[in-house]
Amino acid sequence: MQALDALLNRVSVPRLLEPAPTVAQREVLFAAAMRAPDHGQLRPWRFLTVEGAAREQMGTLLAEAARLQDPKTPQAMIDKAQNGPLRAPLVVVVIARLQEHFKVPKSEQRLAAACAAHAILLAAYAQGIGAVWRTGELSYSPHVAQGLGLKAGEEVIGFLYLGAPQNPPRTAPKEDLTAFVSAWPAH
């Protein structure tokens, strides 16, 4: 697949089935992440893979976080949190590893980690793997961070759900670029 095809046509694929990406496919996914823009060569990211029964454990962690966040959370929302990780055979937790640096502010490090996540999505698309990036309030929960073993200075950027597409991916919409691009100074 040509790079421009992935850049111009990648779409989120929310309905995912077995199988999870193979070992060889995962190597490509994570190798692509390592090519993300990275001012200072800090590699301010790391990844956790969650699959099999570990997805149920992750669901329990998310459900606990929902209860802790608001004891009045409706059971339907707790069930949704519990079952969330089961929506794909593989969940990749993208973690920003923020560090003090004289030249690279934490905001840039966070953006670099997000670029690494995006690279994984592009590499997934290029290999025919369905993928979607999910976040939500629970992504930023201290209880979730602790349960996932995050260290001081680390934070979840998002959860990448990966697997075989249940349906063919939709066609990427063509955007009117004039709504997003302008010259400066304005004329």
Image (spheres, helix red, strand yellow):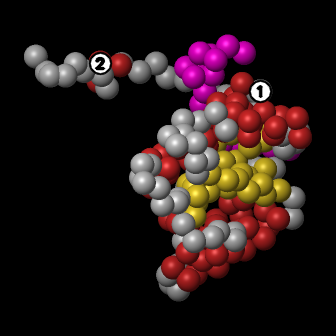
The residue furthest bottom is 71
Task: Please name the residue shown 56% across and 83% down the image.
Answer: 68
Residue 18: % across, % down: 86, 44
Task: Please name the residue shown 71% across and 64% down the image.
Answer: 83
Mark 1 or mark 2: whose residue is earlier in sequence:
1
The secondary element bearing badge 1 is classed as loop
**Relative to 40, is 63 on the left or the right?**
right
- Report if residue 159 is visible in the image: no
- Depth check, front residue: 152 or 144: 152
The residue furthest left is 187
Residue labelled with disc 1 = 127
Task: Please name the residue shown 64% across and 17% down the image.
Answer: 3
Q: Quadrant of the C terminus?
A: top left
What amino acid is found at the position of numbered circle 1 in the picture? Gln
- Report if residue 28 is visible in the image: yes
- Depth check, front residue: 118 or 85: 118
Q: Is residue 7 magenta?
A: yes
What amino acid is found at the position of numbered circle 2 in the picture? Thr
